[in-house]
Image: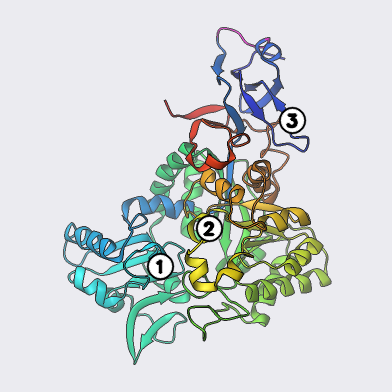
Amino acid sequence: MSTLNMVIVNAQIHTLNKQDSTFEAVGIRGNKITILGSNHEVKGFTDDKTRVIDAKGRVVLPGFIDAHTHFAHMGVREGYLDLSDTTSKREALAKIRKFALSKGAGEWVIGSGWDESHWTDSNEYMNRDDLDAVAPNNPVLLRRVDGHLSSVNTQALEILNLPTGTIGYEEVDGKATGILKEDAVEQAAKILEPSINEFASGITPATEIAYRLGVTSIQDAQVDGRMLKAYRALNDSGQLNIRANLMITTDYLDELVTLGLGTGFGDDWLQLGPLKVFSDGSIGAGTAALTAPYLDNSEELGLLMWDKEELEEIVLKAHENDIQLAIHAIGDRAIDLVLDCFEKANSRQKKDLRHRIEHGELLSGEQIARMREMKIIASMQPNFVGQWGLVDGMYDHRLGRERTMLMNPFASVVRSGVPLVFGSDCMPFNPLYGIHWAVNAPYPLQRISPEQALKAYTIGGAYASFEEDKKGTLEVGKLADLVMLDGDPFNEPTVIKDMSVEMTIFDGKIVYEKS
């Protein structure tokens, strides 16, 4: 073996492979892992040009893979009003007023991240009257943390001019409330969609955030033509500095079929992922499709975005053309519908396309068994437990304790043998926060071990994108994407969310050092 470019010694290297092997040292040449072993074994391939990193006993893991995020949008949102840390409606409105005053008359005020379930003075959504009062001279659009609901003011409603029959366009006594859900949210978003250059510019700061949190690969969960062009432009110019798997929106299914483009087309840096399909909404917006009504609205069962025949047609077309599917399904009624569609596709032609259910917050034991039978991946978000699943949280208020105790059943998924994959959905974009709540979840059906949670955030994501032979574990020949932590999740599992990343290595290069 020739001389190594970089070695890490005095480390606790957890490969997260099938044997859960651990090593003291790792050697990297170029962008690949070339040796794992003892300090003595690895140091034997160093010279004065080799960078030697003393880990001082720290834990080293494969780079995290966020299997469900909104990466390009996260970067663009760096220039928007951030309402994620507001603890009351009054505080949120005060921030909006201040932000609006910094804009010229008629300029858009765009914000995101607000979550009324965390407010102490009101659990009601902001409406047009609230926003007219604090920003009378500007159009305002504020997207809720889950992305399934937006609040707008009168100026925004006039500019957007959405048809009154649009699904999710809320009216009371014939007057728009300024609350948009689902289709109405998406139509508004299309009108205000960033340009190709804005997306490309946003991916760079998003990448810096990713490095700081140990993320080396992402699966962007809702990509349209402009975003794809932005990613391609960066990749073609050598400026895409993260491994990106892109979930293309349903609008492009016919084009993908016509061109013969399928999942996996691309390279180690940029590739087409699954087709992203919505089947329902979110619990926070009251639009996740349930079999039993919401606790706080006994007449509400949520929304199905497609009827059964329409969704079947999409699933069959993708399946028959070897396109992986990633279908958003949160409520149990939506999950049943999606599984029925997968079942019909499999009955026509059995294929192992690693289809995915995204979120699956209200997965039942019977549904998990059906997923195992059809080899469907459970792509889930453990950070949702910390955000909404704790005692007296949003799940309790919307659904009741009995259903909350059965939600996000990571342990049941793992025990069943269904592949478990973790992503953040940018709520928040932080693997250690999500891993913490998978390990320290309040209810037994949710709690899994640190090893299981870490694997869902590494090898799980690699499996979901058909790349388990390239990344996701630390093994000789695999890509040199690694993360070093300042704590030990295996021996200090109760404080994982308080840990941080000490160093991130991407493609064989150090891209982040805390010190």
Disc 2 element: helix
How packed is label 3: few (under 14 Cα within 10 Å), some, or many (20 or more)?
few
Q: Look at 52% across and 83% down and name the residue there.
A: 300
- Residue 181 seen in this snapshot: yes
Marks 1 and 2, how far apart at CA: 24 Å
For marks 3 and 1 on the same chain, the one whose residue lies earlier in the sequence: 3
Question: Do the numbered discs 3 and 2 sit on residues whose CB atoms are within 8 Å?
Answer: no
Within 10 angstroms of label 1, few (less than 14), some, or many (20 or more) residues?
some
The magenta stretch spans residue 46: yes
| Residue 237 visible, this orientation | no
Query: Which residue is at the front of the view, 39 or 324?
Result: 39
Was residue 100 drawn as part of the magenta stretch in this picture?
A: no
Name the residue that disc number 1 marks: 189
Q: Could you say which disc has been placed on residue 21 in the image? A: 3
Q: Is residue 505 above or below residue 377?
A: above
- Give the image location of residue 490, x and y in percent: 63, 36
